[in-house]
Image (spheres, rainbow, N blue to C red):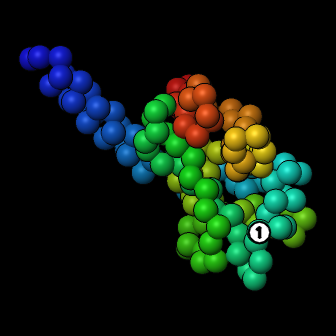
Amino acid sequence: MNAIVQRRIGLCFSSLLQRRLLSSAAPNAADASSVQLSNTCINRLKEICKQNSFLRVAVEGGGCSGFQYKFSVEKQLGEDDIIVSRDGVQVAIDSASIEYLSGATIDYHTELIRSGFRVINNPKADQGCSCGASFTVKLD
């Protein structure tokens, strides 16, 4: 087998493993109180979330490290969403993603070249890419 075929097989297996890890997360094993919101996150959400909108945070397979954080502002809750509330703002996290965010802090960071929401101090993340958008899961 040549190196290109071996790499493609490895990537397919890695993608399958990531999907299985995401789908096998036990619902309600972690709760919303284990996810923290930084003051900068709360302040930014107060500015942008009007008329019953909220920030959705999700963990998906992909990115350069294996898993990636996704952020969006939405108005519709899903039936398996877990809500994190503080100081009048809300963050929704689906029950599969909460497993990968338990103990983490959702932050809003501003730099000269970009600004945006990010996840910091995630005890479930082993290592990540330099931009902070993706991570690998710690294996116990």
Q: Quadrant of the C terminus?
A: top right
Side (left or right) of 12 relative to 75: left
x and y percentages locating residue 80 in the rendered image: 56, 67
Looking at this view, name the residue that lies furthest to the top: 2
Residue displayed at 76% across by 40% down: 112
Camera-side residue: 116 or 58? Answer: 116
Q: Which residue is mark 1?
A: 48
Residue displayed at 37% across by 44% down: 20
Please tell me whether residue 107 is drawn above or below residue 54 in the rendered image.
above
x and y percentages locating residue 121 in the rendered image: 74, 34
Q: Quadrant of residue 57?
A: bottom right
Q: Is residue 116 visible?
A: yes
Looking at this view, name the residue that lies furthest to the front: 112
Please tell me whether residue 124 is drawn above or below residue 80 in the rendered image.
above
Residue displayed at 31% across by 41% down: 16
Please tell me whether residue 122 is drawn above or below residue 101 in the rendered image.
above
Label 1 element class? helix
Side (left or right) of 28 relative to 10: right
Q: How many marks?
A: 1
Mark 1 belongs to which amino acid? Answer: Ile
Please tell me whether residue 30 is drawn above or below residue 63 in the rendered image.
below
Q: Quadrant of the N terminus?
A: top left
x and y percentages locating residue 111 in the rendered image: 77, 40
